[in-house]
Image (cartoon, rainbow, N blue to C red):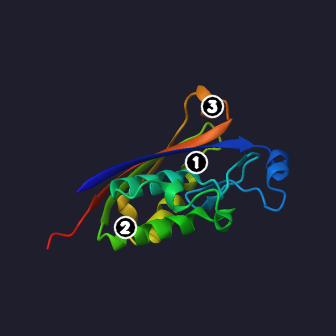
């Protein structure tokens, strides 16, 4: 068995700020592959899905496969604006190539706003489907920092993830 942990954070910006940086992209707030209505948007080279990025880093780390930036660099044009769920599927293929099975995922999104409880089940289902695993083995939690720090001031959203991998015993 191998354990991995991941962390990611992205800045929240207004629609105008987003479009000033990425004029050819539609601003969206995506978490766990779910589009969430909000007045701010996560800024990033991909779709900036911090939850999925943290999970990818945890999976790659547990398998000893470096990190998300090593596999999906923000210097490669093919990843500009990419759906992070596609990156998650690619990371899953890397795990399968090394004969790893995901035992479980435990993750937390840290955001003052928006409230995420209504979206948690859909996030879990999306992640489980992308990784071909039971939804019951994927935990997604949400918390605030009680207005402390950059997440509390609504300047950004962060996420952490821990995964447990196992290899079949032959």
| Of residues 63 and 147, the one drawn nearer to the viewer in this rendering | 63
Whether residue 120 appears in this view of the structure is no
- Disc 3 crowd rating (10 Å Cα; few below 14, some 14-19, many 20+) is some
- Disc 2 crowd rating (10 Å Cα; few below 14, some 14-19, many 20+) is many
First along the sequence among labels 2 and 1:
2
For the point 49% across and 50% down, the residue is 54
Residue 13: x and y, percent? 75, 43
Whether residue 28 appears in this view of the structure is yes
Which residue position is annotated with label 3?
Answer: 150
- Disc 1 crowd rating (10 Å Cα; few below 14, some 14-19, many 20+) is some
Left/right of residue 104 with respect to residue 45 in the rendered view: left
Residue 136: x and y, percent? 36, 61
Query: What's the mark number on residue 95?
Result: 2
For the point 63% across and 56% down, the residue is 74
Front disc: 2 or 1: 2
Label 1: which secondary element = loop
Residue 32: x and y, percent? 55, 58
Left/right of residue 11 with respect to residue 55 in the rendered view: right
């Amino acid at each position: 068995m191998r354990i991995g942990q991941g962390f990611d954070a992205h800045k929240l910006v207004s629609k105008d700020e987003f479009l000033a940086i990425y004029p050819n992209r539609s601003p969206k707030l995506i978490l766990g592959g779910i589009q969430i209505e909000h007045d701010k948007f996560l800024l990033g080279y991909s779709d900036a899905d911090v939850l999925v990025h943290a999970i990818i880093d945890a999976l790659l780390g547990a398998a000893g496969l470096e990190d998300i930036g090593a596999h999906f660099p923000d210097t490669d044009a093919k990843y500009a604006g990419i759906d992070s769920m596609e990156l998650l599927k690619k990371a899953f293929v890397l795990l399968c190539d090394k004969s790893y099975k995901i035992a479980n995922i435990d993750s937390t999104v840290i955001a003052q706003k928006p409230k995420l409880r209504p979206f948690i089940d859909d996030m879990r289902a999306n992640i489980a489907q992308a990784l071909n695993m039971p939804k019951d083995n994927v935990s997604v939690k949400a918390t605030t920092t009680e207005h402390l720090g950059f997440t509390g001031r609504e300047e950004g959203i962060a996420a952490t993830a821990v995964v447990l991998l196992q290899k079949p015993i032959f």
